[in-house]
Amino acid sequence: MHNTMRKGFGNMTRFTLAFVFALGALLGTTGTSTVCAQEILLEGPLAGAPAVRQKIQYRKLRFSVGPQFGYTLLNDYMHSFLLGAKAEFNITDWLGVGVVGFFAFNAPTHLTKHISDSNNLAGDSTVPSDSNWPSYTGSHNFENQVARLKSMIIGQVALVPLRGKLAAFEKLFVAVDGYLFLGGGVVMFQERTHCSGNGCGDIEDFQAGGGTVTRELITKGVVSFGIGFTVYFNKFIGMNFEYRLAPFKWNAAGTDEAGQAGTQWVLHENPPDSDEPIIWDTTAEGSGDYPDGRITKKDQTWNANQSIIIGVVFNLPKNPKITE
């Protein structure tokens, strides 16, 4: 019995020693692998190397200049075609400062043309009535009373968080970057001349198909911001695409918009045996004073003034900086 116990104890001892040696060998191997990996990470050929080598810095310490062409979006009364120029100096590859300016060429929208060609039931050109004067000056004057964007000059800062390459058919590759811009400046536009009472003209002249409407040039401060992309065809020439907003207040339609709500004009039906047509009662009802009968800056409302810009950029000096 003692021999059996001694034999069992010896087997257990040998098993325990074998397990300890196996565990030690495994830990030793793991430790050795970890040390080797650390040595490769710290002392290998990529130790201290930059994330990208030979990177072409298209913007850093370079001037970008070129023509810009644009078109305003969501126009109610007048389209604006933009012609201008952009100049920018890029302090780094991701930060630049510059200035952009536009002149605007205007064309009436379909709505403006439709109102200008409108006729009454008798087939004559529509004219203002007591209920809509001075908002409406008649079909022959309506195009003259709507506002027109004329020019804009903006100083701005550009932040460039994105850059990379675009490929077409796996053969044509172009460099591209994406940027955000924010700035401020001045906008100039023509708006219907402010007036009140008889200063807006004699309504009888307009009802007779005459009368004239004038506009005045207004200059305002404006904040402008948006997003853009630049495609570089080579180290010297590129093309930029921008979506820009420049919100400001103006009276786009040249109408009387100010006043307290409540005033209304009532349509009265004449008795069935009357030969007179249905007429609008020219007596206002209600407690408000809308319309207030004046064209002033109080009639101005906010407009986003969105636009799409396409431009060509020339980068100077001609050769960009290249990293190691």
Image (cartoon, helix red, strand yellow):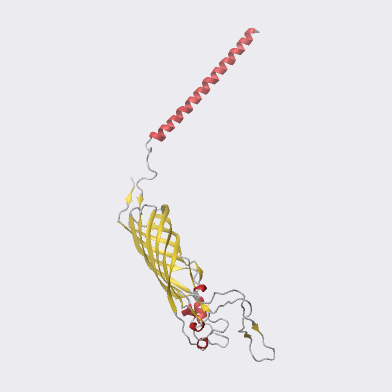
Quadrant where the image shows the C terminus: top left
Image point (41%, 35%), residue name: 41
Where does the image place residue 311, in percent across and percent down from the top left?
A: 38, 63
Residue 169 seen in this snapshot: no
Q: Nearer the viewer, residue 205 or 11?
A: 205
- Residue 160, image x and y in percent? 41, 54
The quadrant in which the N terminus is found is top right
Residue farthest toward the top in the current orientation of the protein:
2
Asked where in the image residue 190 lies, by quadrant, the reply is: bottom left
Q: Quadrant of residue 242?
A: bottom left
Q: Residue at 48% of width from left, 28% of height from top? A: 30
Residue 83 sits above or below residue 292 on the image: above
> Which residue is most to the right?
272
154 or 226: nearer the viewer? 154
Q: Residue 73 appears at what percent x and percent y?
A: 48, 68
Q: Is residue 143 above or below residue 67?
A: below
State whether residue 2 appears in this view.
Answer: yes
Q: Is 249 located above or below residue 201 in the figure?
A: above
Please provide percent x and percent y for residue 293: 54, 79
Instruction: Tell me if 307 is positioned left or right of 93 in this view.
Output: right
> Which of the pair 230/191 is nearer the observer?
191
Q: Could you tell whether 45 is left or right of 283 in the image?
A: left
